Image: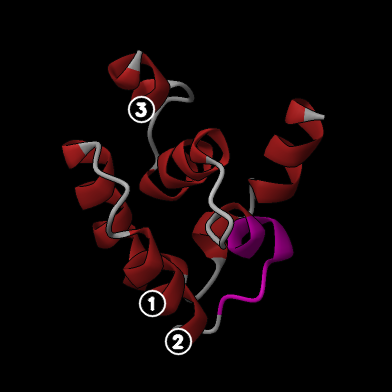
């Protein structure tokens, strides 16, 4: 399932909304604070993101592991970066 999801998300950097929202994802990644997730979700939606996997991972009820994974993906970070920090 993880490999399949990675394949589905491989095209994210080519999406028009990606460049607009990546800086916010990087800030969340750098701080490790998930409080700005609603702002990231709003920015993604405003920028035209309609990718169901992306939106679901950042929607309420928030599942921290899913949110970490999506922030890492959007920020272009190595998988597990946030999880290792939180452990």
Asked which secondary structure carries label 2, the reply is helix
Picture residue at 28% right of the left edge, 40% below the top: 29
Identify the residue position indicated by label 2 in the image.
46
Residue 24 % position (x, y): 26, 60
Identify the residue position indicated by label 1 in the image.
43
- Specify the quadrant that holds the C terminus: top left
In the rendered view, does 66 fall on the left or right side of 68? Answer: right
Total marks in image: 3
Q: Are marks 2 and 1 in contact (CB under 8 Å)?
A: yes
Residue 38 % position (x, y): 39, 67
In the rendered view, does 85 fall on the left or right side of 77? Answer: left
Picture residue at 24% right of the left edge, 59% below the top: 23
Colour logic: secondary structure
Gap in angstroms between the C-alphas marked 3 and 2: 25 Å
Q: Which numbered tag is attached to residue 1?
A: none
Residue 3 % position (x, y): 76, 27
Instruction: Please tell me whether residue 37 is drawn above or below residue 74 in the rendered image.
Output: below
Identify the residue position indicated by label 3 in the image.
82
Residues shaded magenta: 49-56
């Amino acid at each position: 399932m993880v490999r399949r999801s990675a394949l589905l998300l491989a095209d994210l950097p080519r999406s028009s909304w990606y460049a607009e929202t990546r800086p916010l994802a990087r800030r969340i990644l750098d701080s490790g604070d998930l409080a700005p997730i609603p702002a990231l979700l709003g920015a993604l939606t405003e920028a035209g993101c309609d990718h169901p996997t992306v939106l679901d991972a950042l929607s309420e009820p928030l599942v921290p592991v899913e949110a970490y994974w999506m922030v890492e993906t959007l920020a272009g970070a190595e998988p597990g970066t946030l999880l290792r920090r939180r452990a």
